[in-house]
């Protein structure tokens, strides 16, 4: 690897990690709105969204230039193509964090707010998945990536519990329907963030080990190997 290529790879990695840090802050803030009834946090999340969108464009341009103007070797090529995918997943995670913030603000406006049920535990697990996925990118650590993959089923199970609880709440009290729908949106957004964290973990396995698992039919051997 030439010195110039090394520097470009490090720059690309740094920009991806900077974007990931903003996404983590946006997610943490969106959860805080609900747990601490912190409406001022919403303004900060909108600022994060603008920075995330700007970084998405910068990363996309940088990666595209590297593909067009250099001849990266196989490992570097895998990282560049993975960075493009990770960039897209991080941008979507930022959007979903904003969705959670908006739904949380809407929820706080209701005169009677139903129990948030498994939302705090679900948010905690999703935040941990995102944190570990980012660390996997930072260190090129396939074991951390596999840990993220193993966590996804637990989040899915919590989402299903939440949906059942919210539907029962709507059936029991029609006046709380709007609030329960907001909770369903929050749970759905958290589950989608977990899916994007899983995508990032899969991309780490791709650039570190050359393993392509995006269209796998079974996770077992990959998550545990």
Image (cartoon, rainbow, N blue to C red):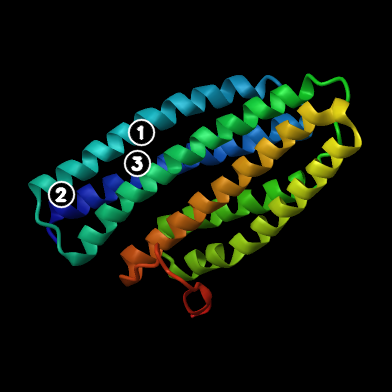
Residue picked out by circle 2? 67
- Residue found farthest to the right: 172
Q: Left or right: where does residue 29 sit relative to residue 140?
A: right
Is label 2 in a helix, a strand or a loop? helix
Image quadrant of residue 109? top right
In this orientation, which residue lies closer to the viewer: 193 or 44?
A: 193
Name the residue rendered at 40%, 62% in the picture.
214
Q: CA distance from mark 1 to mark 2?
A: 18 Å
Residue 15 image label: 3
Circles 3 and 2, Cβ within 8 Å, touching? The answer is no
Which residue: 43% across, 66% down? 141
Q: Position of residue 94 (x, y in %)?
A: 50, 36
Q: CA distance from mark 3 to mark 2?
A: 16 Å
Say the numbered circle drawn on residue 55. 1
* Nearer-N-terminus badge (1/2): 1
Image quadrant containing the N terminus: bottom left
Q: Residue at x 57, y 35 (%)?
A: 97
Give the quarter of the image for residue 58.
top left
Q: Mark 1–mark 3 contact, CB under 8 Å?
A: yes
Which numbered disc, 1 or 3, marks the residue closer to the eye?
1
Q: CA distance from mark 1 to mark 3?
A: 7 Å
**Relative to 17, 148 lies left or right:** right
Mark carried by residue 122: none
- x, y (%) of residue 186? 67, 37
Note whether 24 is above or below 43 in the view shown: below
Q: Are marks 1 and 2 in contact (CB under 8 Å)?
A: no
Position of residue 142 relative to residue 83, above or below, is below
């Amino acid at each position: 690897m030439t010195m110039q290529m090394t520097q470009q790879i490090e720059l690309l990695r740094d920009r991806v990690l900077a974007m990931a840090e903003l996404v983590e802050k946006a997610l943490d803030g969106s959860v805080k709105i609900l747990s601490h009834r912190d409406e001022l946090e919403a303004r900060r999340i909108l600022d994060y969204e603008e920075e995330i969108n700007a970084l998405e464009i910068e990363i996309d341009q940088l990666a595209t230039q590297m593909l067009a103007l250099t001849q990266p070797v196989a490992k570097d090529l895998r990282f560049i193509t993975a960075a493009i995918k990770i960039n897209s997943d991080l941008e979507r995670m930022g959007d979903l964090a904003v969705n959670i913030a908006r739904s949380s603000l809407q929820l706080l406006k209701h005169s009677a707010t139903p129990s948030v049920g498994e939302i705090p535990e679900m948010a905690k697990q999703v935040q941990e998945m995102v944190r570990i996925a980012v660390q996997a990118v930072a260190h090129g650590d396939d074991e951390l990536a596999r840990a993220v993959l193993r966590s996804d089923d637990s989040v899915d199970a919590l989402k299903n519990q939440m949906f059942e609880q919210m539907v029962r709440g709507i059936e029991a009290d029609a006046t709380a329907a709007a609030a329960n729908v907001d909770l369903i949106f929050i749970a759905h957004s958290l589950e989608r963030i977990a899916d994007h964290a899983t995508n990032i973990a899969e991309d780490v396995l791709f650039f570190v080990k050359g393993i392509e698992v995006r269209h796998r039919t079974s996770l077992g051997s990959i998550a545990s190997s």
